[in-house]
Amino acid sequence: MTAKQLENRPLLRPAEVLETVPGLIVTQHAGDGKANQYFLRGFNLDHGTDFSVAIDGMPINLPTHAHGHGYLDLNFLIPELVERIQYKKGPYAAEDGDFSSAGSARIDYRRALPEDYVSIGLGSNGYRRLLTAADKETAGGGRWLGAVEVFHNDGPWEVPEHYKRLNGVLRYSEGTRNNGHSVAFMAYDGDWTSTDQLARRAVDQGLVNRYGSLDPTAGGNTRRLSLSGQWARQDGAVQTRANAYLVDYRLNLFSNFTYAMDDPVNGDQFEQADRRRYGGFGWSRSQPVQWLGKEGDFTWGVQGRQDDIDNVGLYRTAARQRLSTVRSDSVNQGSLGLYGQWGAQWSDWLRSVAGLRHDRYRFKVDSSLAANSGKENDGITSPKLSLIFGPFANQEFYYNWGQGFHSNDARGTTIRVDPSNPGDPMSRVPALVKSRGQEVGWRSAPAPGWNTSVALWRLDLDSELLFVGDAGTTEAGRPSHRQGVEWSNYWTPRDWLTLDADIALSKARFRDDDAAGKYIPGAVERTASVGVAVHDLGPWRGGLRLRYLGPRALIEDNSVRSGSSVMVNLNVGYKLAAKSQLTLEVLNLFNRKASDIDYYYESRLRGEAATVADVHSHPAEPRIWRLTYTQGF
């Protein structure tokens, strides 16, 4: 996906650029400063586990995170700076390691701008946004690029969100992506008040409206600073790449999902705190090879990462004031991955790609409870194979097979006792969990400008292991199986018109027998998206997008299910002059009442005598408008 394709996409949140991945849905269950919820291929990916994202080679998913393992916060992303998005689905690429069982996306920022510009946006619910970006070529042939974003939004919530976001990017680059280098500094600071999901009975009883809050002090603040570099050299047919990065990250997140179930006096608000620095590197080389008399190419590489987490903590709080510590840990976590991939052309109609990857992990946990401190080491090997048949009359068929993995929270690998009740023993969990995937597909260009593909896939996980950050304990999930079918289309019938449509159906079940049932709560079953984009039609451009998120089981026996949602968003741009344009976005065009997310669990409202199992929902935002003026220089 290119910057041109992104230009006409209406976006409510920065992370929605990932909806360019067919079948992927981005929503939110709390304040917009928090990482989004992601759905793909039968997964409720929570805040990112099993889908990895990197920006300019810098991995964004955070392991052993205070709120959720694999936490993927893209609020520091500036969509206008995105040059391209490359995505893969399934565990079939040797270069993809942790958090990539469902897929991965690699986002590249621009190294140069078409022109310098200032963009000013105003909209409903206190929306304000200022973006300025500029670049300058140096006498030596290098180029500086800088951008600053200032953002504010209250949202439709009864308790205003007061989401304030400050973003900055400064980059220096020379040469090209294949033969050059760049260094980038990024800074992000966010602060917000959160309206968390609400118990349905609280709304039905009139205790609060659907945009109201049962804890007006929920919310958070976060900060992210990063320094990254990329280097590439092309010597004939040999391509060598290297990258390195260093990130300083902080988060204080205050939530209350059960209201007064555990503490009827002070309430159930809790704080999740994360303070870390992480850094790493990557190196790869691709070169032509001849083996078994066949021409091909061989790629091999190494990736390393180190997370030094000063504090990952869980605290009981009231109105953002700490009352007690559930657990507080210092974690040192490192990984090293080696991979190789060989592609061969066996005939005019057959080629193959075979890969092998090995990862080693090391964990050290120093816990506030000495019994939960310790060290752990683990490793895993992941083979891959793809066969491509064709082309046959503008079409080809393929078969993918591969193994992947996701790591588990480091605290779960050393745990011995329940931090909430230290007298209760807890079972440790393996550090690394294997996944196995298969996919058969068909790709075709049946008419000029039309690309279509169909894929049948399956994915098995040995265990849906997870660390329950809200409770400070670990749960060993059951083995699971997912399968599905996807149909994707991209058509340009005219130079000024582009149409796209994607449909994804999936089935997710636990593989073992359990009286609770076999349905995986929250697993997405059906998604669809349809888009129309108009570009270069005189002074006009625009996009209209429909997104469907189907119903989901909320409990293992499927007795409670979520509703479905259909959202339509509009983007219309008009060029006022050669260097100025006006853009109108209308989000939730038809003002549909729907949920962004639904859960089913027990909670207790103030005044209730006992806990109640109920559906808890976070509503989608009602119709909003945003008007942006952009002036180029």
Image (tube, helix red, strand yellow):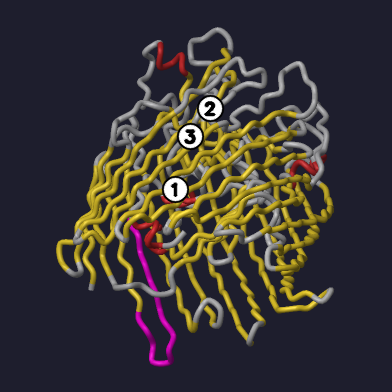
CA distance for labels 1 and 2: 25 Å
Decide which of tag 1 and tag 2 comes sooner along the chain: 1
Quadrant in the picture for residue 547 = top left
Q: Secondary structure at mark 1?
A: helix
Give the overall secondary structure of the magenta segment. Answer: strand
Residue type highlighted by circle 2: Phe
Left/right placement of residue 157 relative to residue 426 reads: left
Q: Is residue 20 magenta?
A: no
Give the magenta range.
Answer: 136-150
Find residue 338 and report its horizontal and vertical position in percent. Answer: 77, 65
Residue at the spot 37% in from the left edge and 84% down from the top edge: 137
Labels 1, 2: front one? 1
Q: Residue furthest front?
A: 393
Task: For marks 3 and 2, give the CA distance.
Answer: 11 Å
Q: Is residue 183 left or right of residue 334?
A: left
Disc 3 marks a residue whose amino acid type is His
The residue under label 3 is 29
Around disc 2, counting alpha carbons within 10 Å, would you say few (fewer than 14), some (14 to 19), or many (20 or more)? many
| Residue pointed to by mark 1 | 16
